[in-house]
Image (cartoon, rainbow, N blue to C red):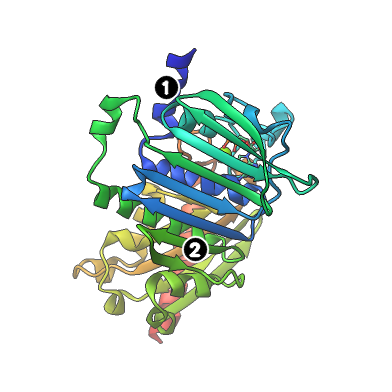
Amino acid sequence: EEITHILAAGEVVERPASCLKEVIENSIDAGASLIDIKLEKGGIKKIEVYDNGKGIHSDDIEYVFERHTTSKIKSVDDIFKITTMGFRGEALCAISSVSKVTLISRHYEQEQGCKVEVEGGKVLSKTIYPFEKGTKITIEDLFYNTPARLKFLKSPSTEQKYCIEVVEKISICYPEISFRMQVDNKRQLFTPGDSKVESAIASVFGSEILKNLIDFSHQEKGLKVWGFFVNPVLSKSTRSGYHFYVNRRFIRSKLLSTCIDEAFKNSILTGRFPIVFLFIEINPVDIDVNVHPAKLEIKFRDERYVYNTVYKTVSSALQSEKM
Ligand code: ADP
Ligand code: MG
């Protein structure tokens, strides 16, 4: 049983950044408007995430670490129309089996909070704990009991970079949430939570970027494509300047990268890439999010349709910008 958990953990939690992504997604699913993140030693020593969301009921709190406990899917049908970030009930089980977790939470309908300590998948304690509101999860000593995995991690500064990237990417598609991030006690990021994508982009990239953002938008049956780009002439960017979001999940996509490459082909031939923030809103039945354990990739049912729509939308914005 324990071995199974540790093996399963490998798929969901590869490194600090993947743990961080999972717990932030839980905070989003809990309806938080504020998410406060603290990181030590690239997240290897410590990841702490506080949110002001609805909290976890004290009757349920120790069960969130069991495999396939999710409060988010009630029927088989739900799997095909997923609207929450999490849905498999694997993340906390996986994380807690390879680290030391302290979970403190107060459910919005309860007077008091509750604190649970878990180490290597075993619940060590559960106590009543006074807590303002929401949930705080602390993940310490990741992979302390799986030395092979620990060895596989990169340097703390590289792991830190991955963690920061995760927070930057998520904060841009959740502009209604104020994200605060401290890295080794220094402020790293602060988004205002004013619901404007541009504000979050400015917090991440500096407000200078705003004057170079060109917007695009197009809507048709079951599909909306919108976003911003910075012209390659001004961006001085390489490929990592592509930010793709599908139904508010950031994803990697060969299909979309190729599509953007094609749309900006003339500049790219001269070695200059645009910065692109592409948001796709699509009927959940037209995608499959179950193709990648960390949900970083998805499958569009009709790839050609998505490709063509994105290409048309971005190209025509590029054309009209040139005029
Ligand atoms: P999933 O997100 O796929 O449901 P997780 O293992 O990530 O699975 O979380 C298990 C459960 O723990 C969630 O379904 C949710 O009920 C609860 N939970 C986890 N984090 C939070 C949080 N920050 N606020 C409220 N509930 C939470
Ligand atoms: Mg989750």
Q: Residue furthest left?
A: 270
Say which residue label 2 marks. Answer: 180
Residue 6's label in the rendered image is: 1
Q: Nearer the viewer, residue 81 or 179?
A: 179
To which quarter of the image does residue 238 belong?
bottom left
Measured Cα–Cα span from mark 2 to mark 1: 31 Å
Q: In the image, residue 59 lies at what x, y percent? A: 74, 31
Q: Secondary structure at mark 1?
A: helix
At x 58% / y 67%, what residue is drawn? 218
At x 32% / y 25%, what residue is drawn? 146
| Residue type marked 1 | Ile
On the rendered image, what quadrant is the C terminus found in?
bottom left
Q: Secondary structure at mark 2?
A: strand
At x 41% / y 39%, what residue is drawn? 140
Q: In the image, residue 169 lies at what x, y percent? A: 44, 58
In the image, residue 229 sits, relative to residue 58, either above or below, namely below
Whether pointer 2 and pointer 1 mark residues with C-beta atoms closer than 8 Å, the reply is no
